[in-house]
Image: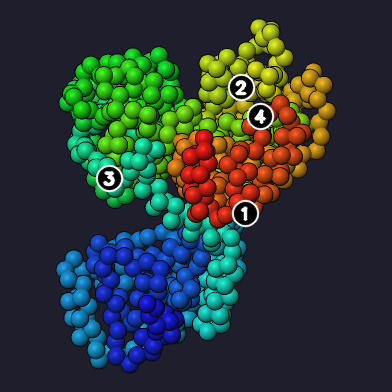
Amino acid sequence: MSGPPLIPMIHAIEAANKPVVAAIEGSALGGGLELALGCHYRIAHSKARLGLPEVSLGLLPAAGGTQRLPRLIGVPAALDLITTGRHITAAEALQLGIVDQVTKQSTVNAAVNFALNVAEKPLDARRISTFPCPHSSDLDALFEEAMQKVQKSARGAIAPVACVQAVRAAATQPYNQGMEREKELMATLFTSGQARALQYCFFAQRAVGKWRMPNGACWDTSKPRPVHKVAVIGLGTMGRGILVALAQTGLSVVAVETQEMQLMEAKQAVSGMLERGAKRRGVVPTLHNITYSQNIKSVAEVDLVIEAVFEDMALKEKVFQQLSAVCKPGTFLCTNTSALDIDHLASQTGNPELVVGMHFFAPAHVMKLLEVVYGPRSSPQAVATAMHLGKKMGKIGVAVGNCRGFVGNRMLKPYIEQAFFLLEEGGTPEKIDQALEEFGFPMGVFKMSDLSGLDIGWRVRKGDGLAESSAASQQSPRIRDGRRYSPLGDLLCEQGRFGQKTGHGWYQYDKPGSQLARSDPWLHSFLEGYRAQHGLVARRIDQQEVLERCLYVLINEGFRILEDGIASGPEDIDIIYVFGYGWPRHRGGPMFYAGMVGLAKVLERLEHYHQAHPDVPYLQPCSLLRRLVASGSPPVNTWKEVIKKVRSQL
């Protein structure tokens, strides 16, 4: 049932000759706040939250929000709220002048009393649409700076830019003309692909909480077990972040680090992180609920353990054997591995059904994503408990199956390899990164590699027997197991170029630890020498080829993951990439993006590149992609039906 149109109703409220007081409880977000701004006074409960979050859905506040808010609180404050969509507390709303009073008692009673007190006062000065917009000394400079800031942070999203344009109309035009401009801008956004992508993300984020395992167990039939006490094993970078995220929930945490020096450093670092986080949130830091220990036996009474030791299978095996021996019966054993076999780790314990992966993303106390990885023997209760704990930690949990690299890192591998191949063929780190950043990634592949450290991937490749020195190798340095291979990353690591930490990687930096990437003449001459050595002729590589080769192989691997049943639907993959890997939200996620581009086009370009590079097997289009194209490229929300048919035939 639809109610009356919102804008005429708000105008009627504002034009009323009796005072109208908005009593705000719970959340006044979007249209709720716009309605309140049409009232003559606003009273909020102390626990209320207010905001205009439309920008996060690819839209703008289109019931007068962009016109009234700047008239009420000034242009800079209004721009901040409207372009970020952030929610604010009642206290901040009072400080900004959005509300007139905050109460801890009954909001309705406070509003009634307030209305009686102002009943005789004239209302002309309370109708926000009649206010002149408070002007700063240099309006043009203010909006130019706002636009530059928004364009930088939006990374190609159009809604924040439209929000600035709408607020500019409020500052420079009469109210009625400003409303017309707001309406025009909204019409453009409403029909845009970006709004569809952002709204898809909004619903996909809720859909991933309704997880399902291949055995039929799912979110609404599997109850989590209560968790009161948790342990973290290993206090390196990841362990510290996980510890901070757990401590902030108020749970009792045992933190184990066997190396004394590492333990002392971790204590200091964790205290600092908790204090800074508490200051930012305006609360008291939670330091009292952490117990530090060098002895793994101190985890004997916990309900759940998260292992976060160095990414080495032999070391993790030993830890899981010890945990199985010292923990009380029924303790859930979770590993923060980013790629190792969960089922193999489970086999080191007496109760493999209690083992799941909890793959956090660095920095673990900041990044929202959590991959909860189940093996073939993981119990539904273990998955439910890990998902529930993740939610308590403020994470977006996505339940996925067990395979090498799970979902995120498995898809990342071909993406990175294609970037290496493009370098060999004539690309540069700068051009490839620029193409990916203009698409909307916060960082291109080579800047990201420098940040995380080239030695991380090198260690993995050495473990897989891929990164052999050319002297020791019996095969061509550019072929492994009959497939194309690029040793470029290995060669840089042999030179001690590990990225930001050493001051040189794919880029050069002013000093080790510096973050400002500069083009490196040494690397460019190294690439020229490498191509000459291997008989490669450099050619011009354009932005379109970079995007097609890097993104379409990532998408193709996503289809294989769906076909293998590792992810239950495209939403799982998209949320993992948006919240864990910097995929731009306004492009919806890799699988949604494939649908927007057109599945037939993705298929055709993959076939083209596979024909050109037959020694790269993962360029061959996945059979699920072919099946979807043959089915008429159905919309992304109906793929699950096709996936079910494909799986039933395997």
Q: Nearer the viewer, mark 3 or mark 4?
A: 3
Label 4, label 1: how far apart the Cα atoms are: 26 Å
Label 4, label 2: how far apart the Cα atoms are: 30 Å
Q: Nearer the viewer, mark 3 or mark 2?
A: 3
Query: Type of residue at label 3?
Result: Thr
Q: Secondary structure at mark 3?
A: loop
Could you tell me if residue 113 is visible in this image?
Answer: yes
Q: Is residue 569 above or below residue 83?
A: above
Q: Residue at x 27, y 65 (%)?
A: 26
Q: Earlier in the sequence, mark 4 or mark 2?
A: 2
Percent across and percent down for residue 146 are: 55, 61
Q: Which mark is residue 497?
A: 2
Q: Quadrant of residue 496?
A: top right
Query: Type of residue at label 2?
Result: Arg
- Judge from the rendering whether residue 624 lies leftward or rightward of residue 306; answer left or right: right
Q: Residue at x 49, y 56 (%)?
A: 200
Q: Is residue 271 above or below residue 573?
A: above
Q: Earlier in the sequence, mark 3 or mark 4?
A: 3
Q: Is residue 297 above or below residue 448?
A: above
Q: Secondary structure at mark 1?
A: loop
Percent across and percent down for residue 551 are: 63, 41
> Which residue corresponds to mark 3?
221
Could you tell me if residue 76 is visible in this image?
Answer: no
Neighbourhood count class around disc 1 (C-alpha, 10 Å): few under 14, some 14–19, many 20 upward: few
Percent across and percent down for residue 573 are: 49, 43
Label 3, label 4: how far apart the Cα atoms are: 40 Å
Q: Earlier in the sequence, mark 1 or mark 2?
A: 2
Q: Which mark is residue 632?
A: 1
- Judge from the rendering whether residue 77 lies leftward or rightward of residue 307; answer left or right: right
Are the two marked residues, 1 and 2, in contact with CB atoms closer than 8 angstroms? no
